[in-house]
Amino acid sequence: MSTTAADTTPRATRQTIDVRPITGALGAEVYGVDLANLSADALARIRQAFLDHSVLMFHGQTLSKEQFADFGRRFGELESEPFLPNKTEVPGIYYLRGAPRDGKSLSTQNLGWHADHSYQKNPSLGAMLYAIDIPPCGGDTLFASNYLAYEGLSQPMQDFLEDKIGIHDVLQYGLNSGHHSTSSVKAIEMLKAMRERYPQVEHPLVCRHPETGRKMLYINCAWTTAIKGLSHAESSAILAMLKAHTIKDIYACRFRYQPGSLLFWDNRAVQHSPNSDYTGQRLMWRLALHSSWEPGQ
């Protein structure tokens, strides 16, 4: 039997990508792609799907840490993680161990709804998780759309928020959630060091995505702690309403992992929440992508 041209095409160019939205709000699963062997066309389609759906899941991937890092670098520079101590031997790749419901200590996975690094001048562009060891059930990750949260507000509320500035603070949420404390001199010294490293930052409550140009409500339940210029009572009431609004089911989706799943989200366009509803082990490799974007700029 003769060999056709299609038979001799390199593996990386034979991929037929199938993007399947998982909800009407956001998120898609991507099939027919090997992330270790990407053609230029496949990468371009993944980039567009990332902007269209904000969160992508790729199942059935077989990657080394180096290949995982290489895929991340297709989208940007890998970031150092300020609160993840478990570095791997590959720069930019971290072990992310689970926070099961039967665990004895808190971890960053108990943060609930948040956006990565919004307490910095330049929040992360996005992040990726690669599933190594997952529980039989549970441990899903939930996402909510900043776009839809803005579009779901009434016109008078959109107008009111148009020029408002949100204060993002790494310390206050940590104190409120119990991750940090003032119970000892050592704990207070740790908070002082964190404050020196991460002063409060200001981001507009309404801004446009730097690539899609789409308007969004730039707020998250963890780090947005006040609205500049409002009284404490006013700020607290409006933020409580907005935070509950942003994570409505109609704006959200959830992803369930399989061994070898890779999850990739646009940190500029979503909040996310890891679900600690499982027992046993959960181990991921994690990377985050640097961005020079300042919300509102």
Image (cartoon, grey):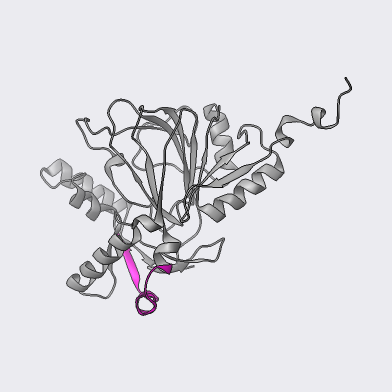
Q: Magenta part of the protein: which range?
A: 151-168
Residue 269: x %, y % from top left: 46, 57
- Which corner quadrant of the image does residue 133 belong to? top left
- Which corner quadrant of the image does residue 81 belong to? top left
Q: Is residue 166 magenta?
A: yes
- Which corner quadrant of the image does residue 205 belong to? bottom left
Foreground residue among 143 and 294: 143
Foreground residue among 228 and 184: 228
Q: Which residue is drawn at 36% across and 27% down?
A: 136
Q: In this view, does 295 lie above or below 264?
A: below
Left or right, residue 228 beside residue 131: left
Quadrant position of the N terminus in the picture = top right
Q: In this view, does 225 lie above or below 105?
A: below
Foreground residue among 91 and 220: 220
Q: Which residue is drawn at 56% across and 54% down?
A: 51
Instruction: Determine if residue 76 is in view.
Output: no
Residue 33: x %, y % from top left: 63, 36
